[in-house]
Image (cartoon, rainbow, N blue to C red):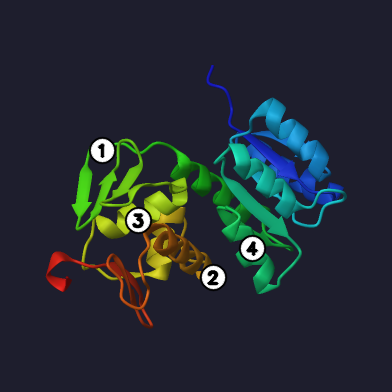
Amino acid sequence: MESREKVLIVDDEENITELVELYLGRDGFEVLIASDGSKALDIFKEEKPDLVVLDIMLPGIDGLDVLKEIRKSSEVPVVMLTARESEIDKIVGLELGADDYMTKPFSPRELSARVKAVLRRSKPKRGLEEEVISRGRLTIDKSRMRVEVKDVGEVVLTAKEFDLLYVLAVNPGIVFRRDRLMEKVWGYVYTGDTRSVDVYIRHLREKLHDNADSPEYIETVRGVGYRFKSEKDV
């Protein structure tokens, strides 16, 4: 019998964890619960969950510090779940490596849908994984998830950064709206906030040494979204 995917829920509100456990359990997940940051890290190391739903406001070690520790050794998908609504909290979480972000109060059905989408996007892709793309000084190896820039060397990207770069690079000259990128990379339909796309684009540009004012690879189309420059644009 195939083992169920494990989801670690980290939240100190018992009513929240019970509700999430109920819905995710119904959807076939094995649910692990931690009420504080220290316990969350212990369970994470011992159980190796497939995904973490992580609150920011936790007793002891807060959620952002827990995320920092997780990212030191793992690229496991993390969905931030918090009562905080400030933009800076969301951006910090995304910059630390969160894959998605939801604020309380939330729909448990939507959370379950987000969990499924993030897990689906994090799994190895089939079909195009043997393709190697060359764009100017940039080489993208899909099968090995490896990116190299001539005269620079290998560029280390997170799984989400790689997926975003690949979607753009495999369609040079095509303008992608932010909501479309969220659908293709994050795996779910636009729900009102596309700021995470801008955060990841900024990270990509920094790692690729791509100047936003005079881009070699990723170009901003004002009021619309982004595109990867085609050879005729160079």
Mark 4 neighbour density, 10 Å: few (under 14) some (14–19) many (20 or more): few
Q: Earlier in the sequence, mark 2 or mark 4?
A: 4
Residue at 39 percent across and 36 percent down: it is: 124
Horizontally, residue 110 falls left or right of residue 227, namely: right
Horizontally, residue 207 falls left or right of residue 10, namely: left
Which structural element holds mark 1? Answer: loop
Q: How much space separates mark 1 and mark 2, taking CA atoms?
A: 30 Å
Looking at the picture, does residue 153 appear above or below residue 31? below
Q: Earlier in the sequence, mark 1 or mark 2?
A: 1
Amino acid type assigned to the residue bearing label 3 in the image:
Leu
Q: Earlier in the sequence, mark 2 or mark 3?
A: 3
Residue ID for mark 4: 92
Q: Earlier in the sequence, mark 4 or mark 1?
A: 4
Whether residues under marks 1 and 2 lie with C-beta atoms below 8 angstroms apart, the answer is no
Q: Quadrant of residue 94?
A: bottom right
Q: Position of residue 145 (x, y in %)?
A: 36, 41
Mark 1 neighbour density, 10 Å: few (under 14) some (14–19) many (20 or more): few
Amino acid type assigned to the residue bearing label 2 in the image:
Asp
Q: Position of residue 194 (x, y in %)?
A: 50, 69
Amino acid type assigned to the residue bearing label 1 in the image:
Gly
Relative depth, front residue between 214 and 15:
214
Residue ID for mark 1: 127
Q: How much space separates mark 1 and mark 3, taking CA atoms?
A: 17 Å
- Of badges 4 and 1, nearer the viewer stands 4
Q: Earlier in the sequence, mark 3 or mark 4?
A: 4
Which numbered disc covers residue 165? Answer: 3
Whether residues under marks 4 and 1 lie with C-beta atoms below 8 angstroms apart, the answer is no
Q: How much space separates mark 4 and mark 1, taking CA atoms?
A: 34 Å
Residue ID for mark 2: 193
- Of badges 2 and 4, nearer the viewer stands 4
Horizontally, residue 121 falls left or right of residue 97, namely: left
